[in-house]
Amino acid sequence: MQAIKLIIWDLDETFWKGTLSEGPITFVQKHADILTDLMRRGIMQSIASKNSFDDARSVLQERGVWDFFVFPKISWDAKGPQIAATISDMQLRPENVLLIDDNHLNLEEARFFCPGIQTAGPDIIPRLISLEACKGKDDSSLSRLKQYRLLERKIADKKHASGSNDDFLRSCNIQVFIGHDCAQHADRILEMINRTNQLNYTKLRLEKADCDALFSDPSIEAGYVIVRDRYGDYGISGFYAMQHRRLIHYLFSCRILHMGVENWLYQKLGCPALEISGDVVTPLQPDLPIDWIRHVETLGDDDPSDSGARPGSVSILVKGGCDLLQIKNYLIRCPRFDVEVNHVGPKGMMINDSHTEIIRRAHPDTITRYGDIIDRLPFYDRHSFVTRFFDGPHDVVMYSVLEDYTRGLYRYRDSDFVIPFHDFLCDATRQENRDVHLLSNEKHRLTEPFLEWFSDNFTFLGPIGPERFCENIAWLCDRLDSRKVLIFLNGSEVLYAPRPEGSRWEHHRIMNRLLEETIRGRHNTCICDVRRFLCSPEDHRHNIRHYSRRVYFDIAQEINRIIAERFRISPGFWETLWQRLRISRKTARVFLKMKLRSAMSHMLPDEP
């Protein structure tokens, strides 16, 4: 067997005993122990399983091993293409991958789509630790896992990026440092010389003594390459040795594949002579324009991934209602401000996919199983079940839970497919509600045939229950990368009289309390409490969920404070921020009047 760098596991009757979709399974702790042992040898672990993504992940999370898997593929799709995608995303060769599966047809399919891949049945599992191919090397710090986590985030973001691949690379803020104290890093350089293949242009292997002689030869210019971008630090990822304008060694780790570093460095060295040995995945192109890489002279504080050091480097994702866009201009300057807010869909209806029940179902398995049903819903589309909430390159996720406070839930037949729609006070499956409630305003889009089909296939469940709401919030917090900050925006508890909303404020109060209790003690979550800024009905617009401009301004300032505190932004930043927020005298007078009006309203006695 060739050296194994990645093991892809089937789950049913392989990693555990039994079939998850058919009943209880028996978890095999010994397999989990083998997996963690292999991880500490630098051998990565992934999944290719036909299962429900949420169900399988829940089992693995309960057993504490979910975070050891990278690029997991859990759906009802064919395994061959998914395995090929995993190997491609991880930038590995099939020859260095082992698939373990109890179904011989799955093994044959993998060999068809990934020629050269190693395959085996579950009987190999007890022998993995003793195999020479699984010897690996000591990685007790799980540094390789961290590197692949960066790659996972990067690929997920690339799939959501608009524009060309060059545009995406420009957004990555790639920085390259070239060091020449090679003897200080001899072990890492020797490892790359003898292990790299895909981006090793010379493929000349060395012993330790040869490597030492190389570094001490005054006629040879040698240098190592450290690469960083906004996703993180890839460490020493390249090496070259040049003698008399001819490259003796020229090689790079596959962890920086497709970043263009090999061509950038080749051009920077003046395109010296190079005799390429064997196949390489990236040809050298002396005339290729590369404007997305920046050479840095030192490894100082200017780290593109260290969002805690500089105010302008914090990236934010906002998920919720489109009214949240009003706070954008008042937030700290950030290189990336992405939104997932309600918008008009292709069928002309407003789509809001920020309910926790939608986020929990935002994975390919939902599309596979219920895509045909989603296509019939004018208030959702398939993009509603795709999110960057967890995998995006954001330091801060700002999330409004008001959809959970407002929408009614509907279950499709006897399935696990639950969607939010309209107000929880109105059962859209009842004929009388279609005529007297807001549904009547959408009759030109919600046609009678659609409403009949909806009533026949969906059951009204009412609002999300307290237990399920707390479960969903905890699930969001647990799944989010611990390095990110999750800021919840809660709901107003003001009685909004201009619109008859009954005891809506009391419902908000109950939900706010549940939210507070659920996130208490979680270090990477907090609440931007909008109740501090909502004192009267005048602070609202149209309904209890929308606020005045002054309130959005105050909310933005509170979020700025949270970000500054969490990312240790220096006090001097606030002067810069205020300069950015300078407004005209006319606008300032408007804000002042609103402030005074709000203050005066609390000082006046109640009307008799």
Image (spheres, helix red, strand yellow):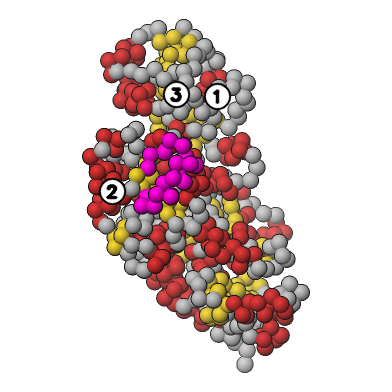
Residue at numbered disc 1: 283
> What residue do we see at 71% from left, 85% from top?
435
Taking the image as shown, residue 575 lies to the left or right of residue 236, namely: right
> What residue do we see at 36% from left, 52% from top?
102
Residue 591 found in image quarter: bottom right
Residue 407 found in image quarter: bottom right
Instruction: Mark yes or no: residue 586 visible.
Output: yes
Of callouts 3 and 2, the N-terminal one: 2
Decide whether residue 113 is among the magenta residues: yes
Q: Classify mark 2: helix, strand or loop.
A: helix
Q: Classify mark 3: helix, strand or loop.
A: loop
Residue at numbered disc 3: 200
Where does the image place residue 504, in percent across and percent down from the top left? 56, 81
Q: Is residue 292 above or below residue 466?
A: above
The Cα–Cα distance between marks 1 and 2, rounded to whole angstroms, is 41 Å
Taking the image as shown, residue 159 lies to the left or right of residue 16, namely: right
Dot 1 amino acid type: Pro
In this picture, which residue range is highlighted in magenta? 101-119
Instruction: Mark yes or no: residue 308 visible.
Output: no
Decide whether residue 151 is among the magenta residues: no
Where does the image place residue 22, in percent across and percent down from the top left? 39, 67
Q: Is residue 478 above or below residue 407?
A: above
Q: Nearer the viewer, mark 3 or mark 2?
A: 2
The tag on residue 123 is 2
Circle 1 crowding by C-alpha within 10 Å: few under 14, some 14–19, many from 20: few
Of callouts 1 and 2, the N-terminal one: 2
Dot 3 amino acid type: Asn
Where does the image place residue 475, in percent across and percent down from the top left? 42, 64
The Cα–Cα distance between marks 3 and 2, rounded to whole angstroms, is 36 Å
The Cα–Cα distance between marks 1 and 3, rounded to whole angstroms, is 11 Å
